[in-house]
Image (cartoon, grey):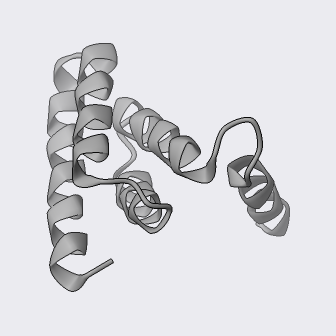
Amino acid sequence: MKAFGALHDASLAQGALDPKTKELIALGIAITVRCDGCISYHVHDALKAGATKEEIAETVSVSILMGGGPSVVYGIEAMQALSQYLEVGV
């Protein structure tokens, strides 16, 4: 797990893409691969990286485009997580 943590940190660090963009990409992938825990984690971290509600909603939309019907269910989960995080002020 320590090695995965290091990979995570290195992958999401500032580079050619900023951390916010990388978190939105990670969220899109989480939705299309149907990973509940990943969705919540990356919605949270996208918000902390400065993503707006609109940017997250567009990420969900593109994920549904690429992932088809099943991604609708997981896209809804992402929007629910977003609402919950915004309620507590993340």
Q: Is residue 89 above or below residue 14?
A: below
Q: Quadrant of residue 2?
A: bottom right
Total labels drawn: 0
- Residue that sits furthest to the bottom in the current view: 88
Q: Is residue 5 left or right of residue 72?
A: right
Foreground residue among 78 and 3:
78
Query: Is 46 in front, or is 16?
Result: 16
Horizontal and vertical percent for residue 31? 34, 37
- Specify the quadrant of the image occupied by residue 51: bottom left
Image quadrant occupied by the C terminus: bottom left
Q: Is residue 3 left or right of residue 27?
A: right
| Residue pictured at 66% horizontal, 38% vertical | 17
Q: Quadrant of residue 54?
A: top left
Q: Residue at x 85, y 61 (%)?
A: 3
Work out whether residue 31 or residue 1 is closer to the camera in this orientation and state it: 31
Instruction: State the residue in front, 70 or 61.
Output: 61
From the top left corner, tell me how far across and down residue 49 is, in percent: 50, 62
Q: Pinpoint residue 61: horizontal percent, then vertical percent.
A: 23, 28
Q: Does 39 appear above or below 89?
A: above
The N terminus, quarter of image:
bottom right
Taking the spot 74% from the left edge, 60% from the top edge, the residue there is 9
For residue 8, above or below residue 70: below
